[in-house]
Amino acid sequence: MKTSMADAGAQTSSEYISHHLTNLQVGEGFWTFHLDTLIVSGLLGLIFFGLMALLARNATNGVPTGLQNFIEMVVSMADDQVKDTFHAKSALVTPLAITIFIWVFVMNAMDLIPVDFIPMTAYAAGVPYLKIVPTTDPNLTFAMSLSVFAIMIVLNIKYKGIGGFTREALTVPFGKYLFPVNLLFRIIEDIAKPISLALRLFGNMYAGEMVFILLAVFAGAGFLWAPFAATLSLGWALFHILIITLQAFVFMMLTIVYMSMAAESH
Amino acid sequence: MNINATLFGQALWFAVFIWLTMKYIWPPLQKAMQERQQQIADGLAAAERGKQDLVLAAERAAEELQKARDQAAEILAQAEKRGGELVEEAKGNAKAEGERIVQAAKAEIEQEVNRAREQLRAQVATLAVAGAEKILKRDVDAKAHAQLLQGLEAELR
């Protein structure tokens, strides 16, 4: 699967690795934009959601065929999870879950493209850096988890009212006399949600990508090692299919759980 | 791990895709799936109804068949009865006709007998007169003895 083009003569291993871990960026300081993350995630989203929108527009209520069947399978999987967990009525939660699952999945799936393939192609085309897996950029995972957090706050207020939300934050779980403790617990609990969501996805994908890069370096260490490293890469890629799906599912599932916690008083 | 303005761009993409899904992907798919579910439910219900209808139809057919059989048997019985009646009637008619014919024949015979008797009577008178002529060897005046002959004739009657 992975054949290294890490040319020992031109690059050291650490140069090779840091090249792979550097985003294509413009701007300075905080106002830096990771163009590769933005463009790859945007393109993937536009392609897949555009395709789905096209299919959905032509969806028949007769016997579904081919792609429609597949999309319906994925979409109704997400819908079933929402129905099982989220009991309030909302036009937002199911589309949110579908968006997260599909988008995270296709972005994670970029990890299965051989590590050097896209960056080397881009390099040859004059683009100095290109990280092809957007989910290895914490900016993306935090953007998603903070958006989920914002929606969570909005749903809290929508379903409980500002008064209900405040009362819950102050009195659960120890009653009204311990309100400072309750509030502190609540703040920690809620802040932990977006951080854990973002870091879980980022960590898994970053580590997975790292293993691919290291195996590619390994393969470049000498032609004797190449078949061994290639076999390991293949094994890791097969295992990674599980991880990318699982991470997409976990992100979706936890989002649904947070939404249901926002909609129900506890 | 450097957090920077990419975050805003990604949040924007995320919002765009949620909006796309919410407006153009989920509602039509949900509609199609629900409609299909409804169609399947309707189809199953129709099949169930069809099965019930079939059972009912079979029952009704059996009922009709039984009714037809009963009716046929009844008609057959009536026909047999009517046939018997007709035979009886024909027998009666034939008997009456026969009797009538016999009666007519008897009457004719009697008439014939009477006519023969008349003729015989007339001839007897003539024979008697001729016999008497021969005995007396002379003519008998028919006119003079007409009364006598007529009296003889009446006596023979």
Image (tube, rainbow, N blue to C red):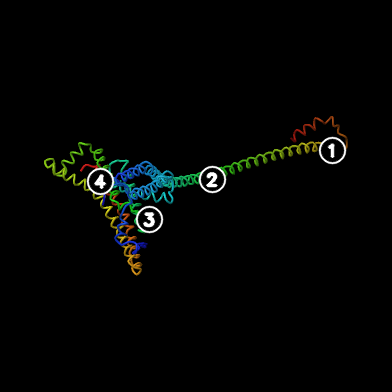
Question: Callout 1: 10 Å neighbours few (<14), some, many (20+)?
Answer: some
Mark 4–mark 1 Cα distance, whole angstroms, equals 164 Å
**Residue in the picture at 85% in, 39% down:** B135
Whether residues under marks 4 and 1 lie with C-beta atoms below 8 angstroms apart, the answer is no
Contact between marks 4 and 3 (CB within 8 A): the answer is: no
Residue A248's disc number: none
Looking at the image, residue B66 sits to the left or right of residue A112; the answer is right
**Image mark count:** 4
Tell me the distance, in whole angstroms, between the alpha carbons under discs 3 and 2: 105 Å
Which quadrant of the figure has residue A259? top left
> Residue under circle 3?
A123
Quadrant that contains the N terminus of chain A: bottom left
Label 4, label 3: how far apart the Cα atoms are: 42 Å
Q: SS class of the residue under badge 1? A: helix
Task: Farthest residue to the left: give it.
Answer: A177
Q: Looking at numbered disc 1 in the image, what kind of residue is underneath it?
A: Ala
The residue marked by circle 4 belongs to what chain? Answer: A
Label 2: which residue? B76
Q: Identify the subunit bearing mark 2.
A: B
Name the residue type under label 3: Tyr
Q: Is residue A132 visible?
A: no
User: Closer to the camera: disc 2 or disc 4?
Assistant: 4
Disc assigned to residue B130: 1
Secondary element type, mark 4: helix
Q: Amino acid at mark 4?
A: Tyr
Q: Which residue is mark 4?
A: A258
Mark 4 or mark 3: whose residue is earlier in sequence: 3
